[in-house]
Amino acid sequence: MASASTSISVEQLAINTIRTLSMDAVQKANSGHPGTPMALAPIAYTIWQNNLRLDPADPNWPCRDRFVLSCGHASMLLYSMIHLAGLKKVDKAGKVHDAPSITIEDIQNFRQIGSPCAGHPEYGDASGIETTTGPLGQGIANSVGMAMAAKWFGARYNRPGFELFENRVYVLCSDGDVMEGVGCEAASVAGHLGLDNLIWIYDDNNITIEGETELAFSENAAKRFEGLGWNTLTVTDANDVAALQAAIDEFKNTTGKPTLVILKSVIGWGSPNKANTHNAHGAPLGEEEIKLTKAVYGWPVDAKFLVPEEVKQHFADGIGKRGSEARENWAKQFAAYENAFPTEAAQLKEIWAGKLPTGWDSAIPTFPADAKGLASRVSSGKVINAIAKNFPWMIGGSADLAPSTMTMLEFEGAGHFSAHDYGGRNLHFGIREHAMAAICNGLSLSGLRPYCATFFVFTDYMRPSMRLSSIMHRPVTYVLTHDSIGLGEDGPTHQPVEHLAACRAIPGLDVCRPGDANEVAEAYRAAMTRQTHPIAMVLSRQNLPTIDRTKFGAAALTAKGGYILADAAGGKPTAIIMATGSELDIAMKAYEALTAEGVAVRLVSMPCQEWFDEQSAEYRESVLPTSVTARVAVEAGIRMGWDKYLGSRGEFVGMSSFGASGPFNQLYKKFGITSENVAAKVKSLL
Amino acid sequence: MASASTSISVEQLAINTIRTLSMDAVQKANSGHPGTPMALAPIAYTIWQNNLRLDPADPNWPCRDRFVLSCGHASMLLYSMIHLAGLKKVDKAGKVHDAPSITIEDIQNFRQIGSPCAGHPEYGDASGIETTTGPLGQGIANSVGMAMAAKWFGARYNRPGFELFENRVYVLCSDGDVMEGVGCEAASVAGHLGLDNLIWIYDDNNITIEGETELAFSENAAKRFEGLGWNTLTVTDANDVAALQAAIDEFKNTTGKPTLVILKSVIGWGSPNKANTHNAHGAPLGEEEIKLTKAVYGWPVDAKFLVPEEVKQHFADGIGKRGSEARENWAKQFAAYENAFPTEAAQLKEIWAGKLPTGWDSAIPTFPADAKGLASRVSSGKVINAIAKNFPWMIGGSADLAPSTMTMLEFEGAGHFSAHDYGGRNLHFGIREHAMAAICNGLSLSGLRPYCATFFVFTDYMRPSMRLSSIMHRPVTYVLTHDSIGLGEDGPTHQPVEHLAACRAIPGLDVCRPGDANEVAEAYRAAMTRQTHPIAMVLSRQNLPTIDRTKFGAAALTAKGGYILADAAGGKPTAIIMATGSELDIAMKAYEALTAEGVAVRLVSMPCQEWFDEQSAEYRESVLPTSVTARVAVEAGIRMGWDKYLGSRGEFVGMSSFGASGPFNQLYKKFGITSENVAAKVKSLL
């Protein structure tokens, strides 16, 4: 193998290896973003080699520092670091294998199907990828959740002499992260909470896709972040490793505030013709330019994917040795902790194993039949409290709507998470739905079981993060109340109409809209065990009768997603009514009226289409027999998504426009969502 | 009618009238938000009575100042002002009627079905409501678009001696507006552009729904906004009308920067038991507390919906007289302008009449048949340029993706909108999709015809504003490229899968995914004339063959949403294939293969479901005959939304999961979206 120039330091050689790997991979893929890895190689090197508390031999060590590449398009920077630092492979079960997380062949297959080196870092594809990034602003917002989780674990589990949790979160981010609103929301939360274990290094390169940032950006970022409660500093030369280390040292010595480092960098650094232009951003440099650039680096111009032996050794001697010592010291400390605090240690081991705590569901209430009933947001609040009390690492909160979403944990010791009490379990996100969801992804990626709450219509504000919960298979619970025109007077801007369809459209997201208090209880029971799916729990503002389960289908069937709540005599229906949530009562009234008239009708409660679709064909056929084509679905949302159950003859009672402002019972009449209308549609099909 | 105490000034009487109307309306509705109108009555009074350039007798005068209540939940504040200022009713056609925009009866019907006084202000329901607000952050972001439009009109149409456009935008906003990310994005754009005609008055009341703002908010807002390039000032007493006027005077005298006034207010001011608590926020005060509060104001405690005669007269003498004089002076000036600059004046009249300019579509190209073809983002770019050249008030831009979305206007004189050139037609939004969309709503509400662009997957970032385009019936054009796994290597975070369904779910939003360059041209031709619908134009990154229209269905049929592109011999198909966008070519190949095998198959291009659904039943039946149940749809998105065309037997070829990172042609194979698969499904149905 050709050797690189020896006239430069091994440190510089290591930095140039990061750069050339990135350039070569992008070139071979003929697609990707070389300029940012070239610019940020020195800071990535500084963090990983000399600061990051990470053991390559045990990359998922729970008390590791976290590294987040929020500018996910610069993914080759991360893949290069994972490869060079020699991280081991970890399988889905959490077992470490004596094989590299990312091989040189993986890097050569950058952006090809099946390579862990995807276009943007995908959580789960390789150890060392702490979160899926790419949509801008998400990574930095995730990092706030990670930093909060680190503080929470410290507050809950550290004991005098046992500083088990003192981990930090290092983040690289770009102009886009800083411009996106979710980034500002997350920064405000971090500043408010005084997260001094969090550092964002902002790659201030003055270049965006349309050209120089001055086209659209002229902020004084330092001043903005100071206003948000951050410590800020500037490093004027991204290649000055000593200055980079000094900045990190200042971060480590700063208490009570997160740190923003404004790093003046040159995109595509070293490229004679493309550095400092947007041409270095999103396309390969080209074979010729790569040679010219390698020459600037003092690199063998024809070598490709070259990793000099001394660079491998250098990383082994650096992060390898440092990380292994740190983890081993920690392991000794934890062994002693386990003796001194067996309960806490046992809990931590459950968390790290991804288990639900024993007895987590033992207090879930059963609600007595009650014609007046209660809003599903209210029963949800009771169920959340009942579960959380026995689930010590379930935490959550709302975007300034706790009294409306009923999501406050009210039992003793729940507490409020704040800069004064990092052990609190009630989170206050402020009016920042998007950051809330992204922060919950970060909490989930740190082992906690988070929930967050807002009005259902405001899922629109946090959809990018909900999508990422699903892409990453994180079991974030979204508590979404005020779920239809049933919220009444607030009017169309606050009334979800298309949101059930829009949420059901997201692959992997469970969408559950329980129809009474016991369906709420059973929905949570089922959802909590589905640890690879986020869930949207969609809840009413208005009261829903609690169904008498001695007379109707068992609430436990909620877990099947759809079930027969009431049937025709002899189980031989000529028509089927399906309903969810607050319309279940309307459907029930229609069922009763039709039955009284002698119509053989079945009533199906369908709280979760995703769960129902997972059932066996036999079960689904038993609930919705093919032979019964007279079907009516009722839901206070749009029809989209129901046709698959309705077939070509079925009818739908619901919304086809935005709502209106008025008392909810009048709105139901105005839009024709009534039991009379349901019954009439059934009869019209017979 | 009882008279109010005369020991207080008429000014104070007017302010208290605003307060008591709001309190009474919320109480009667038994729902709503009294506290903020009570707090902000003095600033609303000061703006409207002494500053706002608005003629109540002609409320839609195009050169009026704009007033935006971004904290839409305080809607009674706005309704009170519209009523007290005596704004006239304006019908949908723009005709002014000699009737009040909002009557006292309307206020008494606050939050009832049919009242223009909805829970949140709804654009179109009454003159004086400049935009629909309620979802927080939207109003302030709209206001940036309005201020940009005012600057643009000034730069384009003012002439020496003819300062036709010198209007300002006054905004009241709340904690939520300031916390939401979209607000920060919009503020950054406003600061960058130096919009000195824009003032945000931030109601800093220290109260949010969960309690005191310090739970989740500890920003130094002044510093943050200074970092964003704003002039900031603080008024410490929301009741000090002189200080409020001084702040507005400072705003008027500030050049080159927008102004933020931090207004220290007391929510529910005057209420002995609820002021300064979140209990004054979102619920009626209660009959007893209203009486106590009215006593504090020196108001007749039993009077309801009382508007003292002297208050009516006071507003007539203030905003009434001032506004009418301003508009009349302006009208004289415009008459002279019309003589001096007839072309410009004629253009302005077209804009104000909501007309499309003569010849706007005369340069739309026809693309020659071409097997290689071009990406629909490329043909879109050509069509946008062809239209915009003849459509002087069509302006737009992208969220830092113009080179990728192909949305730059490149003809001479298009220019770039900046603080140095407010007449530019290319907008640079930065990496701020959400503010982009909200700003476009503001531009549209100001008479311009805006478009904005980003990758299709990032509609998730701006969905709340897209929804509002639709609620408000604003014809904003969303140019959305990189529309499927066809974008290739960027991977699942960047590959829309559920977004066609999610966008089609929004009522009133047209979603068009043209299948070749001529469908692109015809789609824009149709969309531009649909002035009450926003449109999502969904476009490919990869090349699409340009279909030979001498052999296949006419591209002009695109306007019907779905049409027969190729048919079975004699128009007697036994099967139908439907497709959109980049999958039209796959469908065409399947059609050709099946036809060659002797299968009687029809190929339907379905670029816009919304348009197709609007066609007559006869037309729809002619395209999709009920008798043909062997139907296959192919689209590189999820199935949701297609079942209504597929019926119970139909099959779908598309996505059912997130995508992957890899070359796009390999991804199509991996996910089975191939002509072979389409043909096989057709055969399986026969």
Image (cartoon, coloured by chain):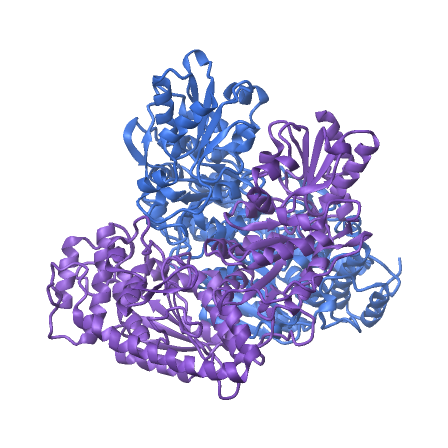
Chain colours: A blue, B purple
The answer to whether one can see residue A86 in this image is no
- Residue sitting farthest toward the front: B339
Q: Residue at x 87, y 65 (%)?
A: A300
Res. A245 in view: yes
Closer to us: A153 or A411: A411
Q: Is residue A64 above or below residue B624?
A: below
Q: Does residue A11 sit above or below B507 in this rendering?
A: below
Q: Residue furthest bottom?
A: B161
Q: Residue at x 35, y 79 (%)?
A: B248
Kindly indicate the quadrant of the structure image that contains residue A430: bottom left
Judge whether B517 appears above or below B633 on screen: below
In the image, residue A80 lies at what x, y percent? 73, 56
Image quarter in which the N terminus of chain A is found: bottom right
Q: Say which quarter of the image contains residue A514.
A: top left
Above or below — where is A23 with respect to A274? above
- Looking at the image, residue B660 sits to the left or right of residue A677; the answer is right
